[in-house]
Image (spheres, helix red, strand yellow):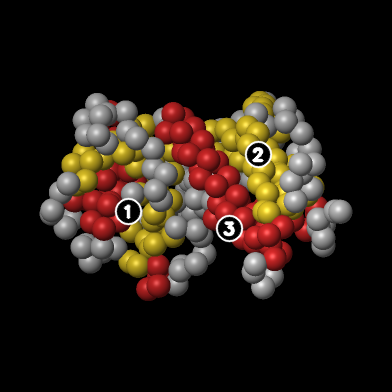
Amino acid sequence: MAVTKFQPEVWSATLLSILEKSLVYAGAPCVNRNYEGEISQYGDTVHITSVADPTISTYTKDTDLTVQVLTDSEQLLLIDQAKAFAFEVDDIDMRQVRSGGALMTEAAQRAAFGLRDVTDQYVAGLMKAGASVHIDGGTTAITVSTTPTDAYDKVLVPLSVKLDEANVPTEGRFVVVTPAFYGKLLLDGRFIKANESGGNGLHNGSVGDAAGFRIIKSNNVPAGTIASTKAIIAGSPIATSYAEQISKVEAFRPEKRFADALKGLHLYGAKVVRPEALVSADVTVS
C-alpha cells in the first residue's frame, strides 16, 4: 500500500518554504541567492562571475573618452553539502489520532527545522572564517557587562565603522547576536525594537535595529576564536552567496513494518565571495 495523498513536489515545496522562512545565517538578509541557478544533484557547481570596477575619469569637452575594457573573474560555489532525514510513523499511532496525516506533516516540519539548524551552523562557520576584519585585531575579547551602553558602544559601533571603512553599502546591513547580547541591547534606549521599527516578522530572528544594523537573534552564533567568547558577525548580503534545493522527498512503506515512512535529501552550498563585507568581534557577555 502506498502512502496516501503523497505528492513529492508539494512536500518538497513545503519543506523548502519552511527552510527559507526559518533560516537565519543562510536566510535573508544575511546571504544573497543571486547565483542559485538550477541544483539537481550533489556536486553541482554555481558559477559566480564578477567584473572589475570601471575607472572614473574627468570629462573634457570635445575630447574622446577612453573606453575601458573590463576584466572579469569567476568564483565557483560548489554544492558540497548533503543532509538527509528518514522517519516512520507506525499505523497504530496513526489510528490513535484524529488525523494520522497530521503526524506525518508535523514530523516533516520538525525535520525541516532540524535541517535549518545544521545549515545555519554551517553558514555561520563559513562567515566567521571568511570575515576579513576582526575588531580589536581578533586578539582581545570584548566584554559586554552590566553597563547598559556596552553592547551598542563597544560592539555595534566599531563593527559599523569597520564596514564603513571598507566602503560596504549601508543598505541591508545585518548583525547576528546571541540571546544574552540581545538582552543587553534591551537596556539601551537607542535600540529600536522590531515592533517599533515596522520590521517585525520580515526576517526570521529579527528583533530590531541599532547602529545601522538589522539585529537578528540566534542560538547558532559560533564560538569565537578566543576562549569563552561568541563570534558576533556583521555585514552585508553581498558578502555571502548561498544556494539550496530539497533534492528528493520520497514516501514509502517499510518492508518489515506496518508504518508510513518519509525520507528527504537537502543539498546546499555557500561561499563568502566578498570577505571585505563581513566583520566580526569576539564577545563575552557577563
**Residue 203 appears in the rendering:** yes
What's the amino acid at mark 1?
Answer: Pro
Helix, strand or loop at mark 2: strand
Please tell me how crowded label 1 is: few (under 14), some (14-19), or many (20+) other residues with Cα within 10 Å: some
Label 2 or label 1, whichever lies nearer to me, is 2
Mark pair 3, 2: CA separation: 19 Å
Mark pair 2, 1: CA separation: 29 Å
Which numbered circle lies on residue 111? Answer: none
> Residue placed at 82% from the left, 60% from the top?
4
What residue does disc 3 label?
21
* Residue 37 versus residue 14 in the image, above or below: above
What's the amino acid at mark 2?
Answer: Ala
Quarter residue 243 falls in: top right
Could you tell which of marks 1 and 3 lies nearer the N-terminus? 3
The reply, left or right, for residue 142 in relation to residue 52 is: left
Percent of width and height locating residue 37: 75, 41
Percent of width and height locating residue 272: 53, 33
What residue does disc 2 label?
84
